[in-house]
Amino acid sequence: MSRIGKQPITIPSGVKVTTNGCEVSVQGKGGTLTFTHKPQITVAVEGDTINVTRDNDSRESKALHGLTRSLVFNMIVGVTDGYEKNLEINGVGWNAQVKGREVHLNVGFADTRIVGIPEGVTVTVEGNKIKVVGPNKQLVGQCAAQIRSHKKPEPYNGKGIKYSDEVILRKEGKALAG
């Protein structure tokens, strides 16, 4: 039995979970999220708990058991608390601006790099800090990764876009012969 998959999920107050065949829908103050799971996994809502079970002990079913439980749990956390990723821009004169559903990045290139913001995700910029917030963990992480990918931090000067909790190991530059 999967150690993660066999754990029941408690439904907090204010959250409504419905299942329809292979589709799980979670509603809360943060919005509505839906997920379609594989047919060999069963998601059952019993009172204020959710139990995830599998039909057989095949390798694929075992792998999907814990995955499905984690995804349903992440949906519940997303509609109650939401997810947040914080990024920092390090570089002289480098900045970001939110214009409509796009983030415009000026990070040392001749042109402005534009990153689209997915539906359901909010991006705010204050100085050199970028905050990506939303109920869907995957979309929040993907949006933050796309912003970061335009100028990854480099180890010599520390310039680039990095996660706020990320540690950049600095390298020593060229030593002068003398």
Image: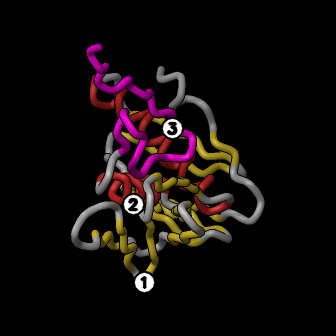
Comparing 87 with 10, the one in front is: 87
Q: CA distance from mark 1 to mark 3?
A: 27 Å
Image-based side of 49 in relation to 36, left or right: right
Amino acid type assigned to the residue bearing label 1 in the image: Lys
Q: Which residue is mark 2?
A: 143
Q: Which residue is mark 3?
A: 166
Q: Position of residue 104 (x, y in %)?
A: 36, 74
Outermost residue to the bottom: 100
Q: Earlier in the sequence, mark 1 or mark 3?
A: 1
Q: Dot 1, how many residues are within 10 Å of its Cα: few (below 14), some (14-19), or many (20+)? A: few
**In which quarter of the view is residue 129 placed?**
bottom right
Q: Position of residue 174 (x, y in %)?
A: 29, 24
Comparing 118 with 105, the one in front is: 105
Eyeballing the image, is 63 above or below 134? above
Question: For the residue labelled by badge 3, is the local secondary structure a helix, a strand or a loop?
Answer: loop
Q: Dot 3, how many residues are within 10 Å of its Cα: few (below 14), some (14-19), or many (20+)? A: few
Q: Which residue is mark 1?
A: 99
Q: Earlier in the sequence, mark 2 or mark 1?
A: 1
Question: For the residue labelled by badge 2, is the local secondary structure a helix, a strand or a loop?
Answer: helix
Q: Which mark is residue 43?
A: none
Query: Residue at (37%, 53%) from the top-left corner?
Result: 148
Q: Position of residue 119 (x, y in %)?
A: 41, 75
Outermost residue to the front: 178
Image-based side of 95 in relation to 51, left or right: left
Q: CA distance from mark 2 to mark 1?
A: 15 Å
- Which tag is nearer the camera, tag 2 or tag 1? 1
Task: Specify the color scheme.
Answer: secondary structure
Query: Residue at (39%, 41%) from the top-left corner?
Result: 41
Comparing 43 with 121, the one in front is: 121
Query: Residue at (32%, 52%) from the top-left corner?
Result: 151
